[in-house]
Image (cartoon, rainbow, N blue to C red):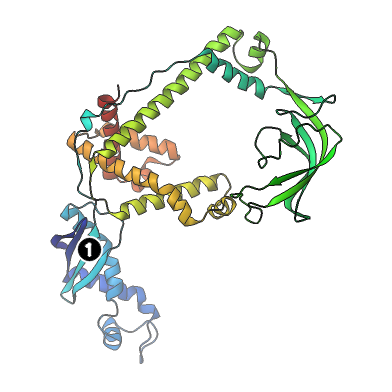
Amino acid sequence: MSLKNSNKIDTNRYELEVEIGAEDFEKAVNKAFLKNSKKISIPGFRKGKAPRAFVEKYYGENIFYEDAINELYPEAMEKAIDEAGLEVINDKVDFDIVKIGKDGLIFKAAVTVKPEVEIDGYKDIEVNKKEIEVTQEDIDKEIDKIRERNARLITVEDRAAEMGDAAVFDFTGYRNGEAFDGGSAENYSLKLGSGQFIPGFEDKIVGHKPGEEFEIDVTFPEDYQVKELAGEPAIFKIKLHEIKKTELPELDDEFVKDVSEFNTLDEYRNSISEQIKSLKQREADMDADDEMIDKVISLLEAEIPEAMFNNKLEESIKEFAYKLQSQGIGLEAYMKYTGMDLDKLKNQFRPQAEKQVKLRLALDKIAEKENLKPTEQEIEEKYKQLSEQYKMDTEKIRNIIIEKDLIKDIAAEKAVDFLRENCIK
């Protein structure tokens, strides 16, 4: 097998002319014959017993050519691509046979390659990370959240419902005088002001007392997920059973002992302050990274094949579907529930997919320019890390992720570190 020619025929498109010698082609044809011989019937022979020469004479010399080509093509293309020094992406391949017969096979294949990339000025990027400050208000808000999680509900009997109360009630929804599916429940508990129900519903429970029966007029939002109810007026009949108010625990040392490993309120406040500082630091780091990435991408010069965006888009949707599946939700069920279809989902993921493609091209070029390469130790450590992450044997990981691809991934990570060191102040 050999590469005869490699010619650029269009932007990001190359045509490879590949030759497979007579000996290799003959072996592949014979393998195809042996694979299919048991299914072949020839007059004068028992099924599967006819010699190859008779089969080819009866059905034509080229009867096994297609299977032979399918056998030879993957390895031949891989070798030709490596010999041509191309980085081919998953896209349509235009295949054409130039010559085929006992003398061997010559074919042409047009492939799409990664674009030529230029990026300058990345060392001049400046990103100022925002300063971190933890205020007493920040600490108080976080402690209040913890108090709310440890609060208890107390039944109220001497007043009407107020925002912030938990109301327990029965309800039945009617549209055009008839109850609709999914619009009723008994002893439903709802925190008023939580926004769990459609706009206006919770507001109209406020002011009513336990034991009262009343009606609520509402209109479903235009973008409501149940299409037959979207934008429609409805009446809910309510029977209010109970009102409960939230009672927060006292903020003292005893509360601290109950919810933490600390003994005093001061120790607890200091711990909360450190947690908030750490969170804000991570947010500041992420914001700085996002700004840096946007500026790097803006410097990229490349005519990017549409196939690269489409491939990343398909990959993103598969990853999203996998995450949904791990939560017990199928992609189709998710789209039905959210009122989306595949085109809308692709439009939602498209901007991020384009950004990821552009960023990776930029990082690969920066890694090349700065000669950022991983050491053997770094490669081994990465394989070990992936093995632990996916709970798989290292050798299996090596079979899934070939070393040359892993090297590029590590180099891209090094390019990110390089940019952080040089750009973020």
Q: Residue at x 49, y 49 (%)?
A: 321
Spot the residue most to the left. Answer: 4
In the rendered image of this protein, does residue 329 appear above or below residue 3? above
Circle 1 residue: 110
Query: Hey, what amino acid is under mark 1?
Result: Ala
Q: In terms of image quadrants, where is residue 289? A: top left
- Compared across the picture, whether 383 is left or right of 246 comes to left
Q: Give x and y (percent) for residue 7.
A: 14, 60
Q: Give x and y (percent) for residue 186.
A: 80, 43
Residue 406 shows in the view: no
- Compared across the picture, whether 324 is left or right of 420 comes to right
**Callout 1: few (<14), some (14-19), or many (20+) C-alpha neighbours within 10 Å?**
many
In the rendered image of this protein, does residue 168 appear above or below residue 148? below
Image quarter of the N terminus: bottom left
Is residue 80 or residue 418 the one in the foreground?
418
Image quarter of the C terminus: top left
Q: In terms of image quadrants, where is residue 163? A: top right
Q: Dot 1: what SS? A: strand
Spot the residue most to the bottom. Answer: 44
Residue 387 shows in the view: yes
Q: Give x and y (percent) for residue 369.
A: 17, 36
Q: Residue at x 44, y 52 (%)?
A: 346
